[in-house]
């Protein structure tokens, strides 16, 4: 079964992981990929939170949240930008409702008025279940892609209100001077026009930000899926630094993560470049050479496949067919790969439309059904254990680690590793403890059943993970103005998990079907169309005929459902994070003939 891999030059092979696998499986896969000689190792975060990692690393030297879960219980204010936690992170909604009951404030930043971010019924609370709870105090509706302008307006407002924490800024940060001159020079009316948020709403938000002692600023794909995704996160980070909301309890920055273990999969090495300390330990412990040059990320591997430069791929879950922009291009790229191995818990349409010329689909047990204990990492940098479970489909199904080891055993030279040890999750954890920075305590998961926070990631006092220990402000220019009539974003509904759709109906947004384009009533009237009318949405990647669905969006903005819309999402990337701009697509619209 390993033949397709044995014959391929390792530089022409890539290894992709979705974010559902255990730390143990991901650690093993990157280890055998590196021993095999391929640096092309990546995971779905390149289409997800890569912009957050890039931005946060340059703000405080670490690419993940600066806070732990308990900080949400201590804060006075939470701002949620570009996220729909009512569907995608429902536990966060309970925390927002709790915060408001304590007298704290919640600000939402989202072009679309999301019903679940206005009122939500908490199943765990009878009052809330019966009557619903208000989720937020203020709902700001910028244009799609208008967040940099909005965050700059908020910063300008804080400066004018005298609400900048000068002591923190002077003692613990660099770069404030340039950011201050930049926001002072930005005219109010331009910020309002570019963000689409009226001055009175900005003033209200500034009042809340200035009135809170401690705040947590959080976000998800609404900020990262743009050609200026990194700038979005940097502009939001500037607000946190200006208020002194970093390096103390109850305050900080929180990227709201995607897949349940996407953070862990990246932490344990499923990425094209490793930090020096990590690479050195891996080389020492397993006798491999980690090249200094980074390998391909996800999009670079797709491009290489399209150019005929990929001979084989190994996929640990995921669906590259439906998660990529420009569906026709993605399908052709994946189909041109001579040999693909896919380890999966379930079949999806990618296994049909995005398979290689020869494709092996190997069923594996889901993380919580594996016989051995596994671990995963939360978005709060907390490593949890899951005890071994009972497979829902007993019999032939094997664990991810077992299947990865079986493939590697056939591909790598005989006797290369002690395969019995590498099939033991406990022994893999010993490897992780020795190799991955901050994961020392993971050995204790077995002996003392201990779960732990990863050291060096979160900041409750000053002294950040940068060379000088200071945090950094960054000047964030306004992105280029869109030239097309509409800015189109693509998003999820309640009844789907990423590329897998369970229900056609989107209850929250009142849509009975998914082949729709959501738009403002004023735009519909101007174009002479109404709810249910067929229209054609055009982008530089193609056209799609869909029905009109009226929603509360500012005029000039459109929304369509992912993954279907990937048929017309062009291949445009954020140059710094390499993330496709899934939510800033230039589009036009006409009535179907
Ligand atoms: N049930 C369920 N849970 C999930 C998932 C799932 O598919 N289903 N997917 C998981 C994964 S991998 C991820 S990454 C997360 C995704 O979680 P989210 O990021 O919450 O999901 P999206 O639907 O992509 O987009 C979120 C919101 O961004 C807003 N938005 C779009 N463009 C902009 C913009 O320019 N500015 C601002 N401020 N807002 C904008 C949209 O209106 C939408 O409300 O959820 C995870 N959890
Ligand atoms: N237009 C547009 N495109 C997008 C997005 C968007 O908002 N708009 N969002 C992007 C984002 S945030 C992401 S994360 C990507 C998602 O990209 P992917 O992670 O590649 O796609 P998923 O649909 O999450 O993959 C789900 C599949 O993984 C397999 N699977 C599930 N659980 C397991 C497991 O435990 N083990 C193994 N081995 N396999 C498993 C199953 O086959 C399942 O069908 O899509 C991106 N693409
Ligand atoms: Mo994601």
Image (spheres, helix red, strand yellow):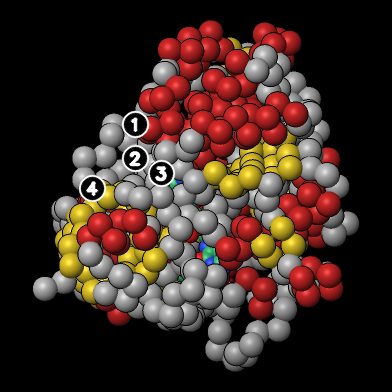
Q: Is mark 4 within 8 Å of ligand 1?
A: no
Sequence-wise, the earlier of marks 3 and 1 is 3
Tell me what residue is drawn at x 47 percent, y 55 percent: 112
Residue 237 visible (yes or no): no
Quarter placement of the C terminus: bottom left
Q: Nearer the viewer, mark 3 or mark 1?
A: 3
Q: Nearer the viewer, mark 4 or mark 2?
A: 4
The answer to whether the residue labelled 1 contacts the one labelled 2, judged by CB atoms less than 8 Å apart, is yes
- The residue identified by callout 1 is 479
Image quarter where ligand 2 lies:
bottom left
- The residue identified by callout 3 is 143
Q: Name the secondary structure under disc 2.
A: loop
Sequence-wise, the earlier of marks 1 and 2 is 2
Q: Name the secondary structure under disc 4.
A: loop
The extreme left residue here reads 593
Sequence-wise, the earlier of marks 3 and 4 is 3
- Where 365 sits versus 289, above or below? below
The answer to whether the residue labelled 2 contacts the one labelled 3, judged by CB atoms less than 8 Å apart, is no
- The residue identified by callout 2 is 227
Q: Nearer the viewer, mark 1 or mark 2?
A: 1
How crowded pointer 4 is (Cα within 10 Å; few <14, some 14-19, many 20+) is rated as few
How crowded pointer 3 is (Cα within 10 Å; few <14, some 14-19, many 20+) is rated as many
């Amino acid at each position: 079964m390993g033949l397709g891999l044995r014959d391929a030059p390792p530089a022409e092979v890539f290894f992709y992981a979705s974010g559902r696998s255990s730390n143990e499986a991901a650690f093993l896969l990157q280890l055998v990929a590196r021993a095999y000689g391929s640096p092309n190792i990546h995971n779905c975060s390149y289409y997800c939170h890569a912009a957050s990692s890039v931005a946060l690393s340059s703000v405080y030297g670490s690419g993940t949240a600066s806070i732990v879960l308990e900080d949400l219980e201590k804060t006075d204010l939470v701002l949620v930008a570009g996220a729909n936690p009512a569907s995608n992170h429902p536990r966060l909604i309970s925390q927002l409702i709790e915060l408001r009951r304590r007298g704290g404030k919640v600000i939402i930043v989202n072009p679309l008025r999301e019903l679940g971010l206005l009122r939500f019924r908490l199943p765990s609370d009878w009052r809330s279940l019966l009557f619903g709870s208000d989720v937020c105090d203020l709902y700001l509706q910028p244009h799609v892609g208008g967040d940099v302008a909005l965050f700059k307006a908020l910063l300008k407002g804080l400066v004018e209100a005298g609400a900048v924490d000068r002591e923190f800024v002077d003692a613990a940060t660099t770069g404030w001077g340039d950011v201050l001159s930049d926001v002072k020079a930005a005219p109010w009316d331009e910020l309002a026009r570019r963000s689409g948020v009226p001055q009175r709403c900005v003033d209200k938000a500034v009042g809340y930000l200035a009135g809170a002692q401690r705040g947590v600023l959080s976000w998800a794909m609404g900020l990262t899926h743009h050609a200026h995704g990194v700038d979005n996160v940097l502009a939001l980070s500037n607000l946190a630094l200006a208020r002194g909301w970093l390096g103390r309890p109850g305050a900080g920055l929180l990227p709201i993560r995607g897949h349940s273990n996407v953070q862990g999969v990246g932490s344990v090495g499923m990425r094209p470049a490793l930090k020096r300390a990590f690479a050195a330990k891996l080389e020492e412990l397993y006798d491999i050479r980690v090249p200094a040059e980074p390998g391909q990320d996800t999009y670079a591997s797709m491009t290489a496949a399209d150019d005929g430069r990929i001979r084989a791929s190994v996929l640990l879950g995921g669906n590259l067919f439906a998660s990529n922009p420009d569906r026709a291009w993605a399908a052709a790229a994946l189909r041109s790969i001579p040999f693909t191995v896919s380890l999966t818990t379930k079949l999806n349409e990618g296994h049909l439309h995005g398979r290689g010329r020869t494709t092996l689909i190997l069923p594996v047990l889901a993380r919580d059904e594996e016989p051995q204990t596994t671990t995963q990492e939360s978005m709060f940098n907390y490593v949890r254990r899951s005890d071994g479970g009972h497979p829902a489909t007993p019999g032939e199904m094997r664990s991810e680690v077992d299947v990865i080891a079986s493939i590697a055993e056939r591909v790598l030279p005989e006797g290369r590793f002690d395969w019995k040890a590498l099939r033991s999750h406990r022994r893999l954890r010993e490897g992780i403890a020795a190799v991955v920075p901050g994961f020392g305590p993971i050995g204790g998961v077995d002996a003392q059943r201990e779960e732990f926070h990863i050291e060096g990631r979160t900041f409750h006092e000053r002294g950040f993970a940068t060379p000088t220990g200071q945090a950094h402000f960054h000047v964030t220019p306004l992105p280029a103005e869109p030239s097309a009539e509409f800015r189109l974003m693509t998003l999820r509904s309640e009844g789907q998990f990423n590329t897998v759709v369970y229900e056609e109906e989107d209850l929250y947004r009142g849509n009975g079907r998914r082949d729709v384009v959501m738009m403002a009533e004023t735009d519909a009237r101007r174009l002479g169309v109404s709810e249910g009318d067929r229209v054609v949405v055009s982008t530089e990647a193609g056209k799609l005929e869909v029905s009109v669905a009226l929603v509360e969006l500012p005029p000039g903005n459109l929304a369509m459902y992912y993954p279907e819309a990937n048929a017309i999402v062009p291949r445009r990337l954020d140059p710094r994070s390499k993330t496709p701009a899934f939510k800033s697509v230039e589009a036009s619209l006409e009535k179907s003939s």
